[in-house]
Image (cartoon, rainbow, N blue to C red):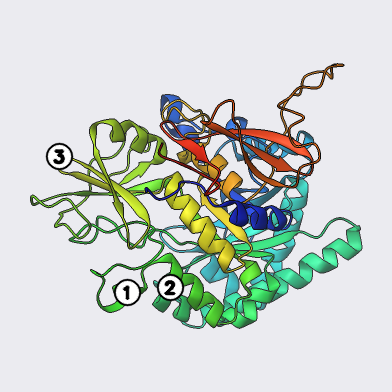
Amino acid sequence: MARPLLITALGLLCALHIASSAKLVCHMTNWAQYRPANGKFTPDNIDPFLCTHVVYTLATINSYNQITPIEWNDGQMYQRLNNLKTVNPALRTLLSVGGVVNGISPFIFMVSRPENRAAFIRSAISYLRDNNFDGLNLAWEYPGHNGSPPQDKERFTELVKELDKAFLEDARDTRMTQLLLSANVASFLPTISRSYEVDKIAPHFDFINVMTYDYHGHWEPRTGHNSPLYGSSLDTGSHVHLNVNSSIAYWMTLGAAAEKLLLGFPTYGRTYRLTSGSNSLGAQSNGPADGGPYTRTPGFWSFYEICDFLPSATAGWIDQQEVPYATYGSSWVGYDDMRSFSSKVEWMNSRNLGGAHVWTMDMDDFSGTFCSAGPYPLINHLRLSMGFPPKPTTTPAPTTTRDPITSFCHGRPDGLYVNLADKTTYFQCFLGNTYLHRCQPGLIYWDSCKCCNWP
């Protein structure tokens, strides 16, 4: 029997209890507004109930150690994003700061002296409060690495400690909710070792976004998956650690608490140009496939661009790594889909991680135009797999006659149940409420495994 595409009822019920504290953090980028036609993305495209947190990417730091916007309309975009909190008051927003100035990370100068850090922290608090953000995300992924002085590893620790202390003092002084502090961090083991004093910084973050993607790409001479859950038998040398399992284990070994770590879920794939008759994992390649029509970056396709590619392609599944790939002609793409997201959520829950972060909202099929699965098919599936209750919808006015569907869960315990009237759907009972879910096309619900599977 084919592998189930949904997590089991036991996994889901465990996730339902986790969901109240778990985080689903979604990044959006301010450069996605420049993509053409249906690829253009702004805060107006955001479903305010989709994610628990949205991270606006990206602002930078000027020569006066102050946060400064990058795009001409960032101020307007901030407002449009944060206005979503009037629709969903539980939504939290963070501003991501990083990038490069003249080819160099602006963090390097800022952390070099205590007075520079103090100026940045004052600027950060003021800027976040003035623009109605709930927190700061540090997008300096490689302190002490890639041209940064070795002592920046320790300076990064000082910055994190000082930010945490200042955010606490600001909350006490203003009697406002304390600002959140998070960071995007590396997933390659040697980079982690060179960049972070993990046991010293982890306690000061509200959550840590581990970038468990970009393990492989067209810069290599053979095909490899962008975000494999596990290694493969083809991995040798340091490549045996280029996978989700190894990266998260290493962060925890170095002292990061599991509940602080968020697993990275990419909504894009990495492409290659094949150079031989082989098209499997490890096939010979030479550079990237052509850029997609919307993201326009060779070697890189958004999920919605992959949806356009799949009907003419041959899709495959890498059993050892629990991720898909597809080929057509000389083009090869490794990507994530609903099945691989389910596998990663099951793994994530087994390690008691703090939740998930998505890179990015604007590369999922946010409009529902391309994949024939509604808006945000990947992130919506991730949300469901993590056990979050369905998002609020407009409900019909009550009637004197009880609806047999909406009343199905009255008196029933939480869980999944077969819909005998239509086996392509199934019921989820949660806190006495009834939610009707639909299996993916071609599948039916099996009560024996509490999953959707082939007939």
Q: Residues within 10 Å of mark 1 (few under 14, many from 20)?
A: some
Q: Earlier in the sequence, mark 3 or mark 1?
A: 1
Q: Earlier in the sequence, mark 3 or mark 2?
A: 2
Q: Residues within 10 Å of mark 2 (few under 14, many from 20)?
A: some
Tell me the tag on residue 366. none
| Three-letter code for the amino acid on which mark 1 is drawn | Val
**Which residue appears at 61% of the width and 30% of the height?**
44
Q: Is residue 305 above or below residue 334?
A: above
In this rendering, does residue 99 appear at all? no
**Element at label 1:** helix
Q: Which residue is mark 1?
A: 240
| Three-letter code for the amino acid on which mark 2 is drawn | Ser
Q: Is residue 117 above or below residue 433?
A: below
Q: Which residue is mark 3?
A: 329
Q: Position of residue 362 (x, y in %)?
A: 50, 39
Q: CA distance from mark 2 to mark 1?
A: 8 Å
Q: CA distance from mark 3 to mark 1?
A: 29 Å
Q: CA distance from mark 3 to mark 2?
A: 33 Å
| Three-letter code for the amino acid on which mark 3 is drawn | Gly
Q: Which residue is mark 2?
A: 246
Q: Tally the marks.
A: 3
Residue 234: which quarter of the image?
bottom left
Q: Position of residue 256 (x, y in %)?
A: 60, 76
Q: Position of residue 320 (x, y in %)?
A: 33, 63
Marks 2 and 1 close (CB-CB < 8 Å) = yes
